Image (spheres, rainbow, N blue to C red):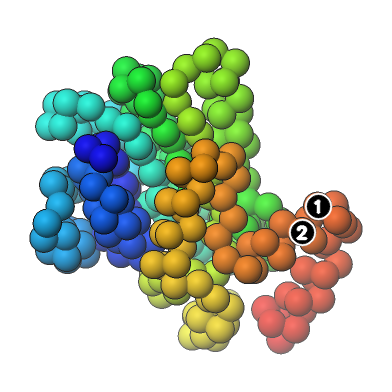
Amino acid sequence: MNKVAVVTGAGSGIGRALAKALAARGCRLALSDVNGIGLAETVAGLKEADVRSYHLDVSDRDAIYAHAEAVAADFGQINLVINNAGVALSASIREMTDEDFKWVMDIDFWGVAHGSRAFLPHLIASGDGHVVNVSSVFGLIGVPKQSAYNAAKFAVRGFTEALRQEMKLEEQPVAVSCVHPGGIRTNIANAARMGRSENAAAQRKGFDKMAMTTPEKAAAIIVKGILKDESRILVGPDAWGIEAINRLLGAAYQPLVERFSRKNLYR
C-alpha cells in the first residue's frame, strides 16, 4: 500500500488499535502521543512495520505545525492524518474551572483543528489525501456534566463537515471523515478530570458499563469507513442508536437524556 498515515494519541486505546490496523494494511506510520511510555509500547508491538514515533502535545499549536514538517521530511509524503488524541472531563458548568475547560478545548478541539490545517498542504500535495477527525457521540447530543467535552466535540463535527465541503468545492484531492465513537473500552475515563463534587469511582464504573466496543473493533470500523470515504463514521451500536434518536426526535431527545441522567448521574 505504501501510504503514509499519521495518528495522534497512538499511545493507547483507539490510536494504538488504529496503528495496528493500518500497519496490517501496509501503511507506513508516523505515530505520536504525549505519553512516551504508552507510545513506546505501541511501537514495540509493530515489529514488521515501517514506523516512526514522535512526542507531541496536541495542545501546542506550534508543535503540531513543526510535527507536520518533520513527518513530511522523514517520509517524503503524507496521505492520511487521523486526529485522534483526546481527553475527558466530567463536571457541571457551575463547578468546572476555567483551567479544565481550556484543557479540554485545547486538546479535543484545537488539537484537531491545528492538526487538520498543519497537514492539509501535505495531503493536497500527495494527490490522494484523507483527513479523519475523531469527534464523539457527544458531538451529536448534549449531556449533563459533559459541557466542555460537548463543546469540543460539536466543534470538531462542525469544523470537519465544513472542511469536507470545502475540499469538494475546491476540487482538492483530499477526502474528509468525521468519526463518532460511542462507548469504547479505553483508558479515557480513568484519565479524565472530575469536578469537585463528582464521585470519580462511580463515574468510571458507569462508563465501563456503557463501553460496548473494543478499540480493535473501533479501529476496524474506522478503517472500513476511510476506505469507503464515509463522511460520518459511527462506531458502535450505541453510536448508531444515538444518531437515530437524534434524527427522529431532533431537540426532543433532551427529555430522554434528562431521565437517564437523573437516574445515573444525579442520584
Q: Can you identify the residue that label 1 sits on? A: 247
User: Looking at the rendered structure, which numbered label has been put on residue 244?
Assistant: 2
Which residue is drawn at the image coordinates 23% and 47% (left, top)?
26
Kind of residue at disc 1? Arg
Which image quadrant is residue 255 in? bottom right
68 in relation to 185, above or below: above
Name the quarter where the N terminus is drawn: top left
Mark 2 surroundings: few (<14), some (14-19) or many (≥20) residues within 10 A: few
Kind of residue at disc 2? Ala
Q: Percent from the top left, x then y, of residue 197?
A: 58, 77
Secondary element at tag 1: helix
- Is the C-beta separation of discs 1 and 2 under 8 Å? yes
207 in relation to 227, above or below: below
Q: Percent from the top left, x then y, of residue 223?
A: 43, 51
16 vs 202, left or right, is left
Which residue is drawn at the image coordinates 32% and 32% (left, top)?
79
Evaluate whether residue 84 shows in this view.
Answer: yes
226 vs 158, left or right, is left
Secondary element at tag 2: helix
Name the quarter where the C terminus is drawn: bottom right
The total of numbered circles placed on residues is 2
Evaluate whether residue 33 shows in this view.
Answer: no
Mark 1 surroundings: few (<14), some (14-19) or many (≥20) residues within 10 A: few
Q: Percent from the top left, x then y, of residue 20?
A: 27, 59
